[in-house]
Amino acid sequence: QVQLVESGGGEVQAGGSLRLSCAASLRTFSNYAMGWFRQAPGKERDFVAVISRLGKRTYYADAVKGRFTISRDNAKNTVYLQLNSLKPEDTAVYYCAADSNYAIAFNDENYDYWGQGTQVTVSS
């Protein structure tokens, strides 16, 4: 059974940093692009960042570009999201997801597996 388990969420003040991790039990982790999405209360789930299978390509939502960094360690079956210069509007539940399709996807409908989410709260 495939499992994606996020960790590293918490509450920080504006301007602070967090590092999210997502450990995946996928048989061949490097066969999946990995994405991060977030969902704020009362809002739809939004794309945050995605990294290609071997980590050579990364893409970010405009709202987080320059502040967040996605990375992966295929030897550890783990993807990371470094969150810097956090703002109150970054408050959301953050989800990691795995996509087996070859093309990079920014739409959550393309992803095959999802984690349970980790809460990030940024206070002003």
Image (cartoon, grey):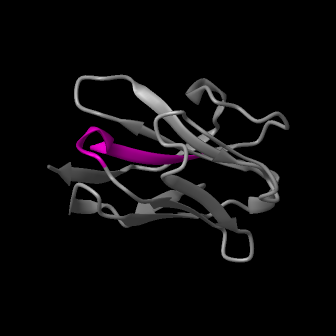
In percent of the image, x 32 and y 43: which residue is there? 90
| Looking at the image, residue 99 lies above or below residue 20 | above
Q: Nearer the viewer, residue 111 or 92?
A: 92
In percent of the image, x 40 and y 47: which residue is there? 94
Q: How many marks?
A: 0
Residue 28 showing in the rendered view? no
| Looking at the image, residue 69 lies above or below residue 42 | below
Question: Where are the magenta residues, as a range?
Answer: 87-97
Q: Which image quadrant: the N terminus?
A: bottom right
Side of 58 where 82 appears, left or right: left
Give the residue at the far left of this rendering.
124
Q: How far across and down, in percent of the image, does residue 62 sit?
A: 53, 33
Side of 66 where 91 appears, left or right: left
Q: Is residue 3 magenta?
A: no
Q: How far across and down, in percent of the image, does residue 63 sit?
A: 46, 35
Q: Nearer the viewer, residue 101 or 86?
A: 86
Q: Nearer the viewer, residue 12 or 30?
A: 12
Q: How far across and down, in percent of the image, does residue 92 sit?
A: 30, 42
In percent of the image, x 38 and y 49: which residue is there? 117
Residue 13 showing in the rendered view? yes
Q: Nearer the viewer, residue 30 or 17?
A: 17
Q: Quadrant of residue 56?
A: bottom right
| Looking at the image, residue 77 lies above or below residue 3 | below
Give the residue at the far bottom of this rendering.
75
